Amino acid sequence: MAGLPPLRTVLRQAGALLVAAALAAGVAALVIPKDRPAPPDEGEIALSTALQRRPSPLWIDARSDAEYRAEHVPGALPLNAENWESLVPKVLEAWEPGRAAIVYCNSAGAQGSREVAERLRDFKLGAVFILHGGWKAWKSKR
Amino acid sequence: MEKQTLIRRGQAVLRIAAGGLFIYAGVLKAFEPMAFLRSIENYQILPHAAAVMASFYLPYLEIFCGTGLVFKRLQAGALALLGGMMLAFMTALLAAWIRGLDSDCGCFGAGDGTGHYGMALARDFAILAALCVLAWRSDSER
């Protein structure tokens, strides 16, 4: 049968689903500890581990240019896919062989940091990690 | 085969595929609420407390609504809620795109590999269109 269902039916059914989901979410919130951190993915590094690395890692900011200009990890160099050609020479100049590079953007799983990390690995100058939790992890711990 | 029979079968396939997709997306996020929370926070729209609630609530709402579609129960309500969620997701994606944020879509858990906002928006638009077709043709009394 073609046509939209009566509004009262829609609201009644939607209400039942909203309540059922709220109950399930409530149980889940009790069972799953909220302070459990998301597990790091392969190639990611936790901030605490990154800060302990010696020699100190080269920080790469893969966020947008505007976000980098607003604030960034001290000493970090900007590098993103959009302006790769103009930004990469400065990174290669600062990256001594054997020194680890840590890439961050707004989230550890974001495409920007993954792409930059993959392209940096091609230079084979040193280990390349993605900061677990990204910029937010840095901001919340500093 | 009669035209009506073909249309009914097509609708059934669309309904089960759409329901299955939301169950899949919801289960992925329900298992990793902290990773989903990270994705929500990357959009920089909701305050932390609201983002925590959404990270626990939305996956179960997707699961219940998806189940409603698959089993043809509370279908009108499920379609209305899923349509509303798709509009909200698309608005968030568009806002992130306009603001130049480099964040994960988070639609299918953290790091879901949707590399571009345009692709994610096109996918969400296609899902929304499918939901509209189902809503128009649904049997409202179920």
Image: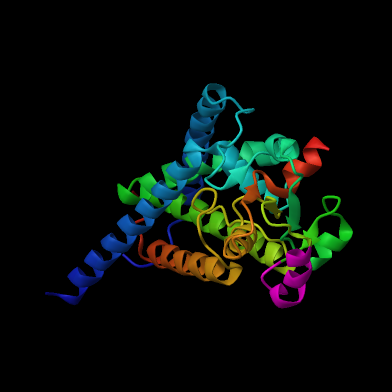
- Measured as percent of width and height from the top left, residue A120 is found at 63, 63
- Measured as percent of width and height from the top left, residue A47 is found at 71, 39
Residue A72 in sight: yes
Query: Relative to A128, does residue B31 appear above or below in the rendering?
Result: above
Query: Relative to A136, does residue B9 appear above or below in the rendering?
Result: below
- Measured as percent of width and height from the top left, residue A79 is found at 73, 65
- Measured as percent of width and height from the top left, residue B23 is found at 40, 47
Q: Nearer the viewer, residue A61 or A98?
A: A98
Q: Residue furthest left?
A: B1
Q: State which region is magenta.
A: A80-93
Query: Relative to B10, does residue A50 appear above or below in the rendering?
Result: above
Q: Is residue A83 magenta?
A: yes
The structure residue drawn at horizontal position 81% and vertical position 55%, both measured from the top left corner, is: A76
Which quadrant, please, contains the C terminus of chain A? Answer: top right
Label the magenta part by its dominant secondary structure: helix
Q: Is residue A58 magenta?
A: no
Left or right of A51 in this view: B138 = left
The structure residue drawn at horizontal position 73% and vertical position 66%, both measured from the top left corner, is: A92
Q: Nearer the viewer, residue A26 or A87?
A: A87
The structure residue drawn at horizontal position 63% and vertical position 54%, both measured from the top left corner, is: A126
Q: Quadrant of residue A88?
A: bottom right
Q: How is the image coloured?
A: rainbow
Which quadrant, please, contains the N terminus of chain A? Answer: bottom left
Number of dots carrying numbers = 0
Q: Nearer the viewer, residue B55 or B39?
A: B39
The structure residue drawn at horizontal position 80% and vertical position 67%, both measured from the top left corner, is: A65
Q: Residue furthest front?
A: A97
Left or right of A69 in this view: B51 = left
Residue B47 in sight: no
Left or right of B5 in this view: A110 = right
